[in-house]
Image: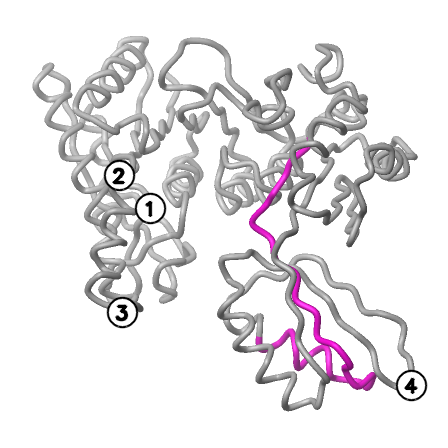
Amino acid sequence: MSLYVQKFGGTSVGSVERIHAVADLIERTAKEGHQLVVVLSAMSGETDRLMRMAREICSIPDERELDLLLSSGERVTISLMAMTLRARGIHARSFTGRQVGIVTNNSHTKARISRVAADRVKAALSDGAIPIVAGFQGINELSDVTTLGRGGSDLTAVALAAALKADRCVIYTDVDGVYTADPNVVPNARRLRTLSYEEMLELASLGAKVLQTRSVEFAAKHQVPIEVKSSFTEGQGTLVTREHADMEQVSVSGVAGDSNQAKVTVVGVPDSPGIAGELFGSVAAAGINVDMIIQNVSQETLTDISFTIPRAELPQTLDLVKKVASAINARDVAVKEDIAKVSLVGVGMRSHSGIASRMFQALSREGINIIMISTSEIKVSCVIEEKYLELALRTLHHEFELDKDSTTLK
């Protein structure tokens, strides 16, 4: 008997009708003889609705109270799902993050999991019940409710799968897998059958919205196989698992774009030891993720430092950077918001040379100027003007023949 953790996103449980459809799927899987743990998100749009109400009350809500408010969305869906299954004669029990024993740190709205007890889940399974668990939430050492950030239900599912030593974690969403590019932008994008954890982690961090980045990190650390499937259509999905030799035969697995980017440049920075540490230390202390960093060659003991951040974090970043810039006697702080990032990802880059130069040449042929460049073993990213993002995605998808079965369906 296999143990599966199944997670259903907000669109999958977005109405009573959809809850019944998901219950059909759960019932079918249970009748196949598998043990199940089900993790649910809030109904589609519910978290945003709660957030809007909170901001109508207060422009900057208290984060402790905000977590308690936002956690209510998942409580609705788990209760309704448990009722639906029990009405069908299926033994099901709903559990909040607190009841499951998902213990986190004290960082409200973006808490990190410290440990998962899962004792009540194990007891329910032993009793022949299907545990229905609220995603996205946990509890800190002070017994306060915490939330795990956007997409946190993915992390809940993977963490439970690791704690229970489940055979597989299946993430059901509104797409039938991970594609070589966004199908809404690149019509001939193809679904990938398998991806390594590293590839999925890069794609998730670069704008692919299929899985939360932290859930992939957790899965890689604990070797939890993740399958991404559609809750709307039958068929095979994408398996995210450990890297194997065949994966390196493909130089590029996918191309991703992210328009949620902004570039900040601190102009005229004194070129002396400790300045960069002071600048980025304050940004890091605020929990802001810096992506690319470029420091120009020093001229007359002054230099310029540019870096990119998520556009949504620009106001907070600017406030911090301007204070540091003033303290270190920098000349100015400049901002560019109309930028985007386009990236190639593939574990095969380790054994295939010339990927970066081929990428640069393809963009050049289309008149797309590269503003910044970042590379790793399995990724090449370029910052470009936002208006060229869709053209860049289609160009690179064609250049690396990602629409061909032999290349994409690994």
Q: Of the numbered discs in the image, which one, if any, rests on residue 291?
A: none
Q: Which residue is mark 2?
A: 42
Q: Position of residue 163 (x, y in %)?
A: 40, 41
Amino acid tagged 1: Phe
Mark 4: few/some/many CA within 10 Å (<14, 14-19, 20+): few
**Residue at x 22%, y 64% (from the top left corner):** 65
Mark 2: few/some/many CA within 10 Å (<14, 14-19, 20+): many
Horizontal relation, residue 156 to residue 360: left or right: left
The residues tagged by marks 3 and 4 sit, at their Cα atoms, a distance apart of: 47 Å
Task: Please state the extent of the stretch shown in magenta in the rendering.
Answer: 255-282
Horizontal relation, residue 7 to residue 224: left or right: left
Q: Nearer the viewer, mark 4 or mark 1?
A: 4
**For this rendering, which residue is in front, 240 or 263?**
263
CB atoms at circles 4 and 2 under 8 Å apart?
Answer: no
The residues tagged by marks 1 and 2 sit, at their Cα atoms, a distance apart of: 9 Å
Mark 3: few/some/many CA within 10 Å (<14, 14-19, 20+): few
**For this rendering, which residue is in front, 189 or 268?**
268
